Amino acid sequence: MFAYIVRRLLYAIPILIGVNLLTFTLFFVVNSPDDMAASQLGEKYVTPEAITNWKRKHGYDKPLFINPEAGGVTQLTDTIFFNKSVRLFAFDFGRSESGRDITTDVATRMWPSLAVALPTFLVGIWVNICVALMVVMFHGTRLDRGAVFLFVALMSISYLFYIIGGQFLVAKTWRLVPISGFHTEGQVWKFLILPVLVGVVAGIGAGARWYRTLFLEEANQDYVRTARAKGCSELSILFQHILPNAMIPILTGVVVLIPSLFMGSLLIESFFGIPGLGSYMLDAIKSQDFAIVRTMVFIGSVLYIFGLILTDISYTWADPRVRLS
Amino acid sequence: MTEHENKPPGSLCMQVQDLTVVAAESGETIVNAVSFELKAGHIFALVGESGSGKSVTSLAAMRLLPDALKIRAGSVTMDGQDLFALSEANMQAVRGRRVAMIFQNAMTALNPVQTVGRQVAETLKLHTRLRGKALRERVITLFTEVGIPDPGQRFDFFPHQLSGGQQQRVMIAMALACEPDVLIADEPTTALDVTIQEQVLNLIMNLTRSRQLAVLLITHDMGVVKYAADEVAVMYRGELIERATVDDFFHNPQQAYSKRLIDALPDLRHFREAAAQRPLLELDNVKVHFPIRKGLLQRVVDHTRAVDGVSLKIGRGETFALVGESGSGKSTLGRAILNLEDIVGGEVRFEGNAIQNIGRKAMLPYRKKIQVIFQNPFSSMNPRMAVGDIIAEGMISLDLGLSESEREQTITALLERVQLTAGHARRYPHEFSGGQLQRVAIARALAVNPELIICDEPTSALDVSIRAEVLELLGQLQREFGVSYLFITHDLSIVPTLAHQVGVMQHGKLVEQGTAEQILTAPQHPYTRALLASVPRLD
Amino acid sequence: MKPVILWSDALIYLLVISLAFFFYRLRKDPQIRERWSQVFSSSLGMVTFTVIATYILIALLDSLHFREALENPEGVVGQEVFYDNKVTSVFDVLTGGMGDRFERTYSAPFALQSFEKENLQDAAGNDIRDYPPLRHAGQHLDDPDERGMDIAVKSVTALFWGALLSLLVIGPQWLLTRGSRYPWRASWLVQGIVLCTGVWMVSISRYYHILGTDLGGTDVLFQSLKGIRTGVLLGTLATLIMLPIAITLGVMAGYFKGWVDDVVQYLYTTMSSIPGILLIAASVLLFQVYIDLNPDFFTIGMEKADAKFIALCFILGVTSWATLCRLIRAETLKISQLGYVQAAHAFGVSHTRILARHVLPNVVHIILITFVLDFSALVLAEAVLSYIGVGVDPSMGSWGNMINGARSELSREPTIWWTLTGAFFFMFTLVLAANLFSDQVRDAFDPRVSLPSAVEL
Amino acid sequence: MRYRMFARGAGIVILLLVTVLAGCSEGPWNNPNPPSPEGKVTYQSVMSPAPPKHLDPAVSYASDESLFLMQIYEPPMGYHFLKRPYELIPLGVESFPTITYLNAEGESVEPDSADVAFSRYHLSVREDARYQPHPAFVTDAEGDALYLFTDPEQGREYGQIGDFPLTDSRPVRANDYVYAIKRLADPFNGSPMLGFMAQYIVGMKDFSNTLQLVPRNGWVNLDQYPMAGLEVIDEYNYTITIEGRYPQFTYWLAMHFFSPIAPEVDRFFRNPGFADRNLTLDWWPVGSGPFMMVKNDPNSEIVLERNPNFREDYYPEEGAPGDAEAGLLADAGKRLPMIDRAVFRLEKEVLSLWTKFLQGYYDRSGEVHGNTTGVFDQAFVVGPDGVELSDDLEDHGITVSPDVKPGIYYYGFNMRDPVLGGYTEEKRKLRRALQIAFDTEEYLNIFYKGNGIPAQMPIPPGIPGFVEGPEGINPHVYDWVDGEPRRKSIEHARQLLVEAGYPNGRDVRTGEPLKIFIDVQSQAISNTSMNWIDRAFARIGVQVEYRPADWNRTREKLLTGNTQIYSHGWLADYPDPENFLFLLYGPESPLICNCDGANNSNYEREEYDQLFRSMRVLPPGPERLDIVSRMVDMLRDDAVWLFAYYPKDIYLNNSWVHNTKRHGISKNTLKYLRIDEELREQKREEWNQPVTWPLFAAAILLLALILPGVIAYRRRLTATARQ
């Protein structure tokens, strides 16, 4: 198991290098260092000297991938790519183009993201599984068909409508919760209710439908028939037999997301004014802050890979048949 | 241990009357007015081929039918109580308590994520007041009773950690836990290797006697019936066509269909003579290994020796039967001869030329000469190609130099030779039955005029009544074209009608080989003897 | 008149032609046929397909573009004909100029007056402040109170013509499909509804703005209808673009295994480990720059917007191939272990031929399922991308742009709800139909594969 | 049993809901603001959706940043809060600077002498000005700074300014002002002012070059490097010498660039390792102004608190006409500032911002730009007398404080463009036709809710040179009818087109339709406004093409003159016509100066340029106004811009906010603000009563969904196998 994890981690390195290479290429086709300097320096009186200065100060005065002037290995190391991405591997994210320390920002913004994403995730799974279990119990009846249709209908509504609708009704018309915002002084949860609610409701359609399929697949297995032949009641079949087995595919789909919860949700966070990593990303995209985007891509990839490893580990926990080697 | 009141031997435990089951949507009748009785201490066998409705009958008796099927009429009575009139809630108290069931494939019928002990305990928890330590002890006693070694430890094992035979024993333990009156065993031995089959049957028979169970044994295997049952009923297309005691049935079958079933049993008295001398294919110490990787860098630490030094010779026009249980490496050997598997040691000589591990191009001339028929005809035909195209494929790619019309003629001839018609060429695989498809597979192999055909369990996916036809066809073709067969099978019973030579494989090694007669009449190796002992026979 | 063929027009027609060819080829394949017939033998399948077909038809009509010729002014001797800068589509013509009837600014559905007060002069020439009458609504009414009656009368007339048209369209179908086992009735019902609504919309919109007008005074119904083309094209083209990559790589990896497999796996793990939205945003910015740097490539603004749109499709395609690729690789791995591939090996069939005849046809169902499944996901994604600012060009009507523009309108008093409603209704109908249809397709083709959507945001 | 787990889950959720409801019982449920400390009057506002990037007064050059800087720093000069036109007043200095003129030899000469080579500004610093309490000022027994570290480990425990246990303060001295100017010149700081100011302040360029060579490792004491144009006379007096004459220099002194910076503060922030924790001057401004920064979290909020050391400052006793009636003089003579705390929260979405404002959780709206247009869309209607508040805002008691920004937004023609550019009569007519066709009034009404004034000239109201009334209109586009300007008719525009050789928008020679190209920033134009412009020009048969691009590309195009019509906006640095007319000064053209010049129209008229040069050095007066008016006439004749308007800046105030007169240039107005806390509490309570029936409805709905399930399950349990 330990060897397995170490191997997976080693395997992650070329992937992360690939990720970095890709983001670098993309971003420097979009944005030359001169552009970055110009847009960061503001709109008035940008002199070429100021741009050169900025580039030197932020380390963009070198060639991108290969430095023909340097000799030997430094041809590859004395470049923007090497200098900027090697540090990422040490989780030293450097400073954003506007001069903020990214590591600090990420570390502080991670928690609000998690505060929204984690309850959404947990409550979402719980609600989806409950709903799906209920529907599975009535498989083949009109109730089931109606519910599936409802799921599909819920799925077909754009996320934006859920957010806009939720804000409009719950916060603006009914004044039940603050429309947006976040602060940690006092009642944090009142800011979380609406985003979590919106997140959960928006996810019910797709989630419950998916779980229903998984449960049905399990319900057709032989061991369910065995359990029935034993005299188990429908309820206990559902909870004792189908659910634990369905956990295996559920885990595949779900565990991989857990680390990514730190990344938060782009839409929810920006609509509800949650100062998390999701809105951080959105701002970075909008202001073309390469350092932040690069960092977030890197973190996202790391978390994803981490999620994959976690998925494998959770398999061993959910499925006794699986052994990692 | 609770005291169990055994019913007097022969008393009526369950009566099924006029049971009729239909498909819920189409209304098609699946089981038609089936009636029988189960008596204490008796094993009642329900025989039929797949799709005859025997499993549906048993499920209907338990009210476990899938949603797609509905009980139309009839009744199941136990102790004067009509099971069909019970509410679902009351029915739950009957299942497992008074009627228990064993299923065909214990691997899938057991919950893979629960320990076997808990699964057995669950039955007890549902129907008795046993809890805690007493419960565990009861389960361990049951395990001991059904012959699971080291039951205390096995309690906490997961199903996949047990062997197939042990899994089936767990199933039996689970069924017997609450001491039911009736046991329904649905193909309890089909998924097991032959050597284990016998042990499980013995167990069921012993328990029937000791506990005075009424057993409904559902099987397609006449050998099993002959070995275990007291009474037998034959189902054909949803109806019970014949019912008799076992002795009557085997000596004096009434229906033509019943006769066919009985005829499928092996005859171990007539053998084929050794045919040719000049070897066509020679294997010399052939080894196929699969690497086992471990550790941080996935270094190869060891190999699975799938085929570990096999040597044999097949002559022209000769059939060599390679017998062994699943996992013995016999199929791997077949694939290795076909150059579909890398050979790590030894030599394969075809007509004296070494052909192991030669390139794709170099292999092409031999591909015409060595052909193959696979076990499952459904998966060995591309469902998206017409049968004619499937047969033509080899002719085209091996460039037999035929024009299109010549090809079509050949295909027609081949199809007719395997007892199909020219019109079948335009049909697609799913429109054929298994037996027909296997004939197409034979035609495909014959299309390139091979000298050797490797038959990898060609009949094991077929029903017994069809099996004989296919084997007969293979035999005819050998006489006609003089082809050699390497016949890979786990079923010793079909060997006598077909094979000149027999080799027995175990753990990648050929433990014994010789003429069919030698092997079947005077086996030397204990493994061969065990295999042979488990073959049911008519005598 | 001068036809204008935008890249997206060409691509969508190419897609239609290749799909037609594809199905023509497949029609012989009994399994595929049986499965399709399973899809269509349920009325739900029929209904949803008819709805989708309607959307696609509108999209196709809206993809036939032309520029109208300008009449030469007097005194100009040149023989050269010049064309209007505005690109019109056949669909624009069919709507009867719905898009040309502008108001000054907001107006509510069926309103006769603007939503906002303005300085006016009454009959006596005094300055008053009131809601000005609309330019293109209720001009024919003498008395504003007649509006309800007028709408009712006009609706009945329109529905009558709609019913007549429906009869004309459905009649021949009825004759052709007699004895067919498919539930054509369900389809006809939808066709009838669509035709009646269509006729009703076109005829009523001459007198009223059915869904009101937006900030710039454009008819909201027209905008919503124009969003159809964007939605449908995005949903299909993005997948179309990704298919070759995903199929080639997936099949190669699954079939050849070894280092090919390693490389492909590396590629798609890398690809899928990047947060999709960042990748999409970065790529969209990239294309934007490219287009900005090469303004001479596009003579008219629509072409530029179109190029951006194609780029967006391309990016969505390129960033989402990993999922399909992984599925195809897995399926190919499975297939290459199957008897018929082994048999083909035993017959010495060449790799290309095995791939073409044995592997590819047997992964088609996965491709199909992905295609229908991704369709709705992409339509939904468009709205989100527009919100983030990396969606389709604002000059190209799309539901995402409508929602994005109308987000704050809800907070007005009285609420301006019709822009969002318009976008919501048309988008919801399409996505719902597509989702239901994809369920049917999935059930028919592979009930066991549960595919996660390729586009995750 | 596993379903217990699920039941427990449900229990937890219900329990949570109950606690939530119980917890909500005090006060409105939807209060989004963090509780403010007892006894402190807190002002609640928003910050821009793009949080400030730079708060170093030498570096920052964005108006949303100066909102904060100007509360914290006090530059030498400032503006009178109430008086209009804008009036300079001394702020950090005792009085207006005294100017002496010097010849090339440095001898004092008469102000109007032709020999003037330098002007020397003498400033005397207020003696009562003190810095805010700050750890940088803390000294140990020997008088050395306490928080001075030699390696990053030492200061590790301090992550925020508030983490330092000790603070101290000291009076502002003349050297601090000089130090601040030297910081502008230090190339390491990358001040946007460096290039511009180096043209004027003597020795700045040399100073900058010297410092370029100084090795950087931690703090460099700029006091050790002299700058020729700066002199510290004594503790409270210093001079600045500038090249030639530049009357506008006094205005520059009112900008935050010239605010004092204490060298020890600069040194403090150069402590090793501080920058890694965002402990920089760019992040934590330290000044002598009325407020100080106590929290800077760009992710959620910025909090300012009253500077306890702020000098004595009082509310002005006099104002502009009408101010007394508006109640703006009610607090005359009171000590400033009048609030204790100001919280600026990050708000990105218009809907949230607007809703919270209407719910009373934000005191004032319109403080920052970025998402305010959306807000004002909701707030205003165009009435007979111009812009009015919409009805529900009136009901809320919301008041408006508008001010026409000293700025101008415009779409300009590129005068070098072969089709639209050029100075021939035909081309002028063509441009005028386009000017007439673009109905600026309607454009503003629709897209800006009337919050802008169509420009008749490049100089906005409130700036000398602006002319009101019939004399002030652009005679080529407007007529003066019934006491107001009226746009000339479309027919007139058509006629002009005919004269220009484009009858009906078609080239009379080839018949080719006239197509104009507009370069815009992608985010700056919406689809609806594009449609509107299309229609506007379609009326005279002209077709429009847009070339949207991002800011960098647009800028590139402007620099290379590769545009036809471009959009631009200019906000004045100081209220002087020079700051507007230079937008069309020939040498400012990017194509001529090869720089990022402001004359993107590439307008080149020798006469105009000469007039500009003479106007620049003239002191205010009729002579200068005359030159200005001649320049304006030239611009009108040449029709250089397609259209222009003066944007309005608006505060929307809740009824409890007082003294909110908007100042177009100075942001230094927070200290005047007063808040009626009692009224605020009362209104918030009143406006935010939750509507609870949906909660019950939701509960019932949930039950209704579960019930059929329960029923069906029971039915299934009792079913038999017989139908």
Image (cartoon, coloured by chain):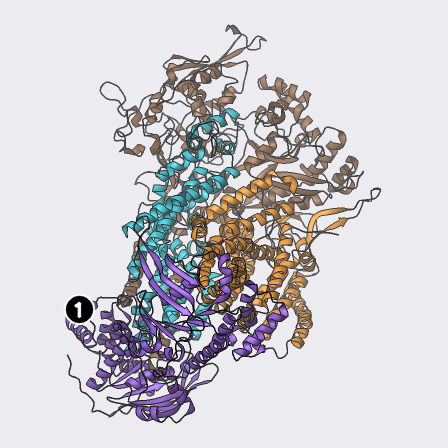
The image quarter in which residue B152 lies: bottom left
- Amino acid identity at mark 1: Gly
Chain (orange): C
* Residue B242, placed above or below residue B127: below
The residue pinned by badge 1 equals: B152
Give residue B428's position: percent from left, percent from top: 54, 73
Give residue B260's position: percent from left, percent from top: 41, 87
Chain (purple): B
Give the colour chain A carries in the figure.
cyan
Quarter holding the N terminus of chain D? bottom left
- The reply, left or right, for residue D357 in relation to residue C125 is left
Q: Residue furthest front?
A: B277
Q: Does residue A310 appear in the picture of this structure?
A: yes
Quarter holding the C terminus of chain D? bottom left
Which chain is mark 1 on?
Answer: B
Give residue D284's position: percent from left, percent from top: 36, 31
Observer-nearest of A29 and A163: A29
* Residue B340, placed above or below residue D56: below
* Residue B300, placed above or below residue D124: below
The image shows a total of numbered marks equal to 1
Give the colour chain D carries in the figure.
brown
